[in-house]
Amino acid sequence: MSISTSFRDARLCRARKIHVDNLSLKSAMRAAARPCILVLAVLLDSLALTSRLPAQEPTPEVKSAVTTSVQPPKPEPAPHRFWDGRNAALFAGVAGARTLDYISTQHFRNKGVDEVLLTNDIVDNKPLFVAIEAAGVAASIGVSYLFHRTGHHKIERWVSVIHISVGTAGAIRNFGLEPKQPAGTPP
């Protein structure tokens, strides 16, 4: 084998590795996006279905029984603006939780611990990881807006509360991870 053939083979191997790495990054991103898209599609479909269902009138015998034991209906809460003070504070909390997640993930990656939910290549690519965290905030605001538009105002607020809780709990866990032990050393 000549030197030029060896050099050409090495160059082809590097080109194949780069191509395989790009394919695995793309496939990892697609695989991570599929469940999110599926959940969003099911959610949108169910919300659209509930908004199309007609209100059912009770039958006459049920209507007479209902009217005798029904208390006066509670007044419905007045609809609020989407960007009111409470939602703005909740969305700021979601952004803070995602920022804390970013910092804690970078912290444990610096210790040598591997990422579980995403690939290490995605997490180590800081602009990409920042974009993913920002997309998480935007998705939370978008889901809240869908609930707001369909009149589910309590669920609208709970989306952000749950997002803040899960994000903060994950960041606390990330900060508690121990550094990776080198192979062959006792723990």
Image (tube, helix red, strand yellow):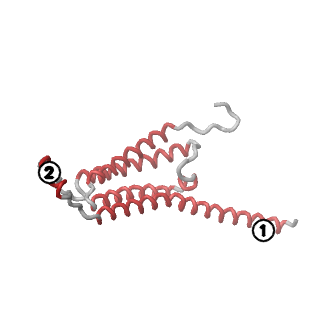
Callout 2 amino acid: Pro
Judged by depth in the image, the label closer to the viewer, 2 or 1, is 2
Residue farthest along the right direction in this orientation: 1
Q: Nearer the viewer, residue 70 or 109?
A: 70
Q: Residue 170: which quarter of the image?
A: top left
Q: Position of residue 90 (x, y in %)?
A: 30, 50
Residue farthest along the top direction in this orientation: 186
Q: Position of residue 22 (x, y in %)?
A: 61, 63
Res. 8 mark = 1
Q: Nearer the viewer, residue 3 or 66?
A: 66
How far apart are the two marked residues, 2 and 1, measured between alpha carbons? 81 Å
Which quarter of the rendering shows the C terminus? Answer: top right
Q: Nearer the viewer, residue 1 or 89?
A: 89
Residue carrying label 2: 73
Q: Secondary structure at mark 2?
A: loop
Callout 2: 10 Å neighbours few (<14), some, many (20+)? few
Residue farthest along the front direction in this orientation: 61
Callout 1 amino acid: Arg
Q: Residue at x 57, y 53 (%)?
A: 119
Q: Position of residue 182 (x, y in %)?
A: 66, 38
Are the two marked residues, 2 and 1, in contact with CB atoms closer than 8 angstroms?
A: no
Q: Earlier in the sequence, mark 2 or mark 1?
A: 1
Q: Residue at x 26, y 64 (%)?
A: 54
Left/right placement of residue 21 relative to residue 54 reads right
Q: Residue at x 71, y 63 (%)?
A: 14
Which quarter of the rendering shows the N terminus? Answer: bottom right
Callout 1: 10 Å neighbours few (<14), some, many (20+)? few
Left/right placement of residue 122 relative to residue 146 reads right
**170, above or below 139, in the image:** above
Q: Residue at x 55, y 46 (%)?
A: 109
**48, above or below 91, in the image:** below
